[in-house]
Amino acid sequence: MVAHAYSVAFEGVEARSVEVQCAVSPGLPAFSIVGLPDKAVSEARDRVRSALSSLSIALPSKRITINLSPADLPKEGSHFDLPIALSLLAALEIIPKDVVAGTVSLGELSLDGTLVPVLGALPAAMAAAEHSRDLVCPKACGPEAAWVEACRVIGANSLHDAIRHFTGAAVLSPATAGEVSQPFQGRDLRDVKGQEKAKRALEIAAAGRHHVLFVGAPGSGKSMLAARLPGILPPLSPVEALETSMIHSLAGLLDDGGISRARPFREPHHTASMAAIVGGGRNAKPGEISLAHNGVLFLDEFPEFSRTVLETLRQPIETGEVMVARANAHVRYPCRFMLMAAANPCKCGFMGDATRACSRAPLCGEDYLGRISGPLMDRFDLRVEVPPVTHADLDLPASGETSATVAARVAAARDLQTARFTENARVHTNADAEGQELEEITQMDAEARSLLVQAADRFGLSARGYHRVMRVARTIADLDQSEGVHRPHLAEALSFRLMSAKES
């Protein structure tokens, strides 16, 4: 007889349905698993055998075959333990077949039958909801999976609890969703003394999700400014929070099943490998750019990153997704992030400082910043020179606007963009607009258009640079609550584009 259970296999953030078939037939005693399993799945037979033995359930002296269908889909991970055990118990008529066939299950089994938490409960719940099935998972994964309201989630502590639930001896209550953690307020922008232009650039970048590059001497406050960026970003919308949490679920970053409304802020070290940044590895896991989806990727000491790593950022910045190609699979991850980079002006860091002049200037700076290729540099919407702060400024009391004040303007600008792009699911912020849509939303007057054309001819802006100036100008106008883009908006956008550019 053949019994059926269901689980999932992960391809990027997508959970594909897997049918677990169990056949118990006459023949020499054996326990085999087929259907392209990896090592972790193949070892499930020993964990399942031991877990059943701990419950005093003896396997019959027959041939047991587990087939994971579709057979050409790679199966990876220990979460197949529970569905294999349930299909086997259904084949042995210990639990009802029809009840098992109406659920999706995942979970790793300990040798004593305890269920161990696994990754990916949230996307698994979404896959179960699509097929109108319940989800059975380890109890620790229940709060995470329960965020999918269309799916009834059952969390069990052990295989024994699951058996009692399926037989009706002790029905388990559905899991409840975890807590929504409040957005992290971050450090206050008011603490930053001076650097008014850099703070203005942060505000514009946060309002329109524009990429920004800070160039300045060591100790000028580049990292300090970056640390205050989370405090002015608006919280994630419910849809964005679910998208981000699905990626973090696969990476094991969700705490106690809670979903955060704070935008991700990832800051990998400059020694990180390409697989760590872009994604990949043996199981094609999401990288830092995907973990920063709907948030910020901060790359300090930007030129110190490997040239290969930097160049791989070019396509994800444009498309908002990354394809991790492997010999046996192609995995796609979303990565719509805001790139914030910081760099010293040269290797020693003191080029342009009159008190500590760089002995190799200007070659030192050209060689150092030359590690950033022209195409990659062209993708930064805002380029800001961050000068050193004088000691006199450091002695002054904190002044300027607080993060809360700036965050209110950013939120108002984001609200305008949400209303503007409500009918276009592909576009979320001004940074995503392109083509005819960009022309329509800009609403540039004649003076602004004339200034843009003159600047493009004078400084040799690329087509990409031309359109990025338009996007930044639209965001500046949104911060001013202006319907159209006027000459002052465009002039400010050009000042950020051309200050550090070498396009003339």
Image: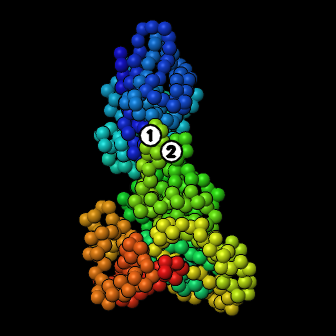
Front residue of 416/438: it is 438
The residue type indicated by label 2 comes to Ala
State the mark number for residue 284.
2
Residue found 41% across the figure and 59% down from its top:
320
Horizontal side, residue 8 vs residue 230: left or right: left
Q: On the rendered image, what quadrant is the N terminus found in? A: top left
Q: Mark 2: give few (<14), some (14-19) or many (20+) Cα within 10 Å.
A: many
Q: Mark 1: give few (<14), some (14-19) or many (20+) Cα within 10 Å.
A: few
Q: Which residue is mark 1?
A: 329
Front residue of 245/141: it is 245
Residue found 51% across the figure and 36% down from its top:
77
Q: Indicate the quadrant where residue 384 lies.
A: bottom right
Against 175, is 260 above or below? below
Q: Choose the circle earlier in sequence order: 2 or 1.
A: 2
Residue found 45% across the figure and 16% down from its top:
64
Front residue of 243/235: it is 243
Whether label 2 touches label 1, CB < 8 Å: yes
Front residue of 370/219: it is 370
